[in-house]
Image (cartoon, coloured by chain):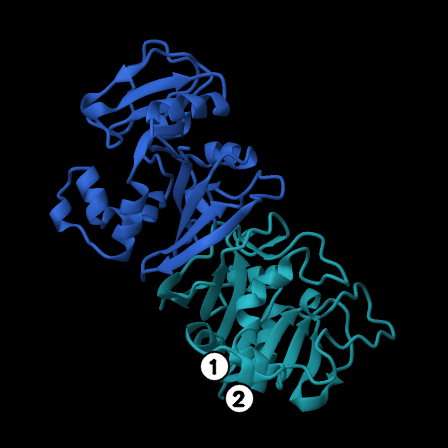
Chain colours: A cyan, B blue
Amino acid sequence: MPKLRFNMTMSLDGYVAGPNQSLENPLGEGGLALHDWAFATKTFRDTHEVGGDEGETGLDDDRAAAWNTNIGATIMGRNMFGPVRGPWGDSAWAGWWGADPPFHTPVFVLTNHPREPVEMTGGTTFEFVTDGIESALDHAVEAAGDADVSLGGGAGTAQQYLRAGLIDEMEIHVVPLFLGGGSRLFENLSGGPAGYECVGLVSSPAVAHYTYARKT
Amino acid sequence: MPKLRFNMTMSLDGYVAGPNQSLENPLGEGGLALHDWAFATKTFRDTHEVGGDEGETGLDDDRAAAWNTNIGATIMGRNMFGPVRGPWGDSAWAGWWGADPPFHTPVFVLTNHPREPVEMTGGTTFEFVTDGIESALDHAVEAAGDADVSLGGGAGTAQQYLRAGLIDEMEIHVVPLFLGGGSRLFENLSGGPAGYECVGLVSSPAVAHYTYARKT
């Protein structure tokens, strides 16, 4: 069975985006620095075509690579996809990632407002799902074939899947940064997340990687 | 100058005590498990006189030992000291730690209610400070002589010192546990903590240790 896999970077004070998110500052104030560890890796630089050979290898790159392997479809919330709110109208918004997004798979965007699929260069297609997280997962599993499904953010989307107990594997990358406000990952979970066991904890000087599997 | 040093263990979802703290369950539901990594160390077993030779050495023990070294006085909040609320009256409560507490130094307990000092076996004296965190720090620095001052919990006390910018060095031990509720360490900080830089991040399979120093 394909797995639903989720990985996200969090500040030590629990935020996955900083305060005052905006079009100019989609990760909020200070939020971009969450991902400095990832930006430095060969894997990130390869997948974003910004010069993989100049990227770092080692433990952090290994973790980034593990989460980029065997992904056949992606699910994300509308806030991760873009800043547009309400009906799509004739919006031409097609994500933050330019003409050739780094997914190279179908991407299922959770939204309350229907929209026709948007086909991008390089194998990424944005499809818009209006009937909830389980439907999005069904579509993604079907699209992924034998591969797994990756769950993106934001925090609200992750919380919906955590509450529903639908995430099979997750890794939280905790960086020694304080954002002081913004979007917390672990809240609105009704006493959870429940049912996960830690199966790995490793660190570099930049980040500690906490890996969990759902208890069977 | 003596330093004010603070170390505390936090769950991955940000709690330093679980939900529903009580006399029977002073760390809240599930909260005791926060400290499993520490309980296993030689340092903890030595300082609590429960058989140090059976304790583990290695990275986690090194971190525990570092935080037990060169401490000349301790500050803690009333909730860490005990469950008694309101005036002390003729309460005989003298902490959770028995006749010979593991501090072996003066311990300054923050409270709104005056009480005479309580001298314990082994060099620990509980003194009760009613005029605020800076006064407690002044008393502790004077008592500590050339050694440093250790700040204990709980979360509310730590937040007061963090807001005031009085902590010189801190280490947050993050364990891969989810408590789902309880006392969060990093909240009520008005956008902080500010002014700290990470000077170390190391991990064992049980816990990652994030060390900070105040920027000078």
- What x and y, as percent, mark residue B106? 31, 23
Q: How many marks?
A: 2
Q: Secondary structure at mark 1?
A: loop
Foreground residue among B133 and A174: B133
Question: Relative to B23, is A82 on the left or the right?
Answer: right
Foreground residue among B83 and B165: B165
Specify the subunit that label 2 lies on: A
Asked if the residue at tag 1 contacts the one at tag 2, i.e. Cβ–Cβ closer than 8 Å, the answer is: yes
- What x and y, as percent, mark residue B159? 51, 36
Q: Are marks 2 and 1 on the same chain?
A: yes
Question: Relative to A204, is B44 on the left or the right?
Answer: left
Query: Is residue B51 in sight in this rendering?
Result: yes
Quarter that holds the C terminus of chain A? bottom left
- What x and y, as percent, mark residue A118? 75, 83
Query: Is residue B99 in sight in this rendering?
Result: no
- What x and y, as percent, mark residue B163? 56, 35
Specify the subunit that label 1 lies on: A
Q: Which mark is residue A2?
A: 1
Quarter that holds the N terminus of chain A? bottom left
Residue A74, above or below B196 = below
The residue located at (32%, 60%) in the rendering is B204
Mark 1 neighbour class, 10 Å CA radius: few under 14, some 14 to 19, many 20 or more:
some
What type is the residue that disc 2 sits on? Answer: Gly
Instruction: Residue under label 2, please give it.
Output: A145
What type is the residue that disc 1 sits on? Answer: Pro
Q: Residue B18, located in which quarter of the rendered image?
A: top left
Mark 2 neighbour class, 10 Å CA radius: few under 14, some 14 to 19, many 20 or more:
some
Question: Relative to A213, is B184 on the left or the right?
Answer: right
Residue A126, above or below B118 = below
Extreme right residue here?
Answer: A90
Residue A147, above or below B26 = below
